[in-house]
Amino acid sequence: MRTDYALRALFFLAEKLDRVPVSIRELADRNNIPKRFLEQIMLEMKSKGWVASLPGKNGGYFLSRPPAQISLGEIVRHFDGLLAPIFCVSVSEYESCSEEKKCRFRRVLLNIRNHVAKEMDGSTLDSVLKETPVSRTEVFDQGFIGGAGI
């Protein structure tokens, strides 16, 4: 949930290109995030240099870098730790496996890791804001749901 909440807040701030500070209460209310939880997340994002804040009655948070300079990959890695689907294909949290030398499906998972990393690192707040929201029809596209559990 921390990644989801962080992305909600960052996208909200990215839409406000005027850099007018947004109060924590407004950020929480507008993005359906518990205020206490958001306070912790905003402090983490401030320490990463993604947001800055101004104190006082008219204070609040704003992006400290342009939206084109903040990638989804760096945000997700910070809050979730890794993009790899399993530890034996992770760089940052690699763990060996007894089947590593003969495992065939590990190649697929490595390819998935590489694709996800490339997509996430190449997607900035700015580029994602230019996209249209995903429709329900896209989620349930019959061409992709042939297997149970997708």
Image: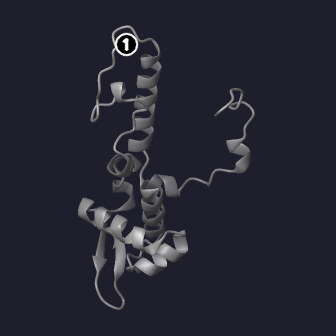
- Residue 94 to residue 45: above or below: above
- Residue 63 to residue 80: above or below: below
- In the image, 106 versus 72, the foreground residue is 106
State the SS at label 1. Answer: loop
Residue 112: give x, y in percent of width and height.
Answer: 46, 28
Residue 56: give x, y in percent of width and height.
Answer: 30, 89
Residue 82 visible to the viewer: yes
- Residue 58 to residue 25: above or below: below
What residue type is disc 1 on? Glu
- Please state if 43 lies on the left or on the right of 24 as rendered: left
- Please state if 148 lies on the left or on the right of 59 as rendered: right
Q: Quadrant of the C terminus?
A: top right
Residue 64 visible to the viewer: no
Going by the picture, which residue comes out furthest to the top?
102
Q: Which residue is mark 1?
A: 99
- In the image, 105 versus 111, the foreground residue is 105
